[in-house]
Amino acid sequence: ISGTFTFSFDETINSSSFDPMRVTIQGAQSWFPGTASYVLTGGYIATGNSDVLMLVLTLNDLNNVKAIPSLAKSANTTFVSLTAYTVADMAGNMVVPISNG
């Protein structure tokens, strides 16, 4: 894991509305008891308003994710879930939540 995640959306997103603490990284597409997961504690968006946002993880989050053996080691072990309050578009509409990555 490089310390960044790139999120793609269908429309332009207000980058300042992004709340990384509402993002969970999962080791499987569908969460079930025992699935490796980690809720981010911070980070920042390194891009402006766009349909593609790049999230830079905190060093603490990066180290904690790296410490979980079955999490974010490849595309097959990297999924995210988002709450409805993770981010909004330019009109203030909240993202459709993703309960399973």
Image (cartoon, grey):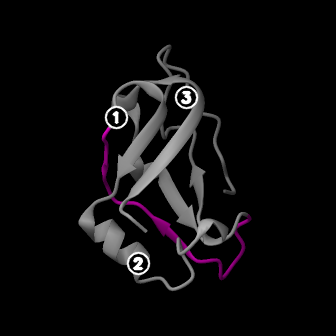
Q: Which amino acid does the dot numbered 2 rest on?
A: Lys
In what element is the residue under mark 1? loop
Name the amino acid type tagged 1: Thr
Q: Mark 3 points at which residue?
A: 94
Is the stretch drawn in magenta largely helix, strand or loop?
Answer: loop
Of callouts 1 and 2, the N-terminal one? 1
Residues at circles 3 and 1 in contact by the CB criterion of under 8 Å: no
The answer to which of marks 3 and 1 sits earlier in the sequence is: 1
Magenta segment includes 62 = no
Hey, which residue is sitting farthest top in the picture? 91
The CA distance from mark 1 to mark 2 is: 24 Å
For mark 1, does the 10 Å Cα neighbourhood hold few (<14), some (14 to 19), or many (20 or more) residues? Answer: some
Q: Quadrant of residue 34?
A: bottom right
Q: How far apart are marks 2 and 3 (CA)?
A: 30 Å
Q: Is residue 38 magenta?
A: yes
Q: What element carries label 2?
A: helix
Name the image quarter holding the C terminus.
bottom right
Magenta residues, start to end: 30-46
Q: Where is residue 66 in the image (x, y as percent from the top left)?
A: 41, 78
The residue to which callout 1 is attached is 47
Q: What element carries label 3?
A: loop
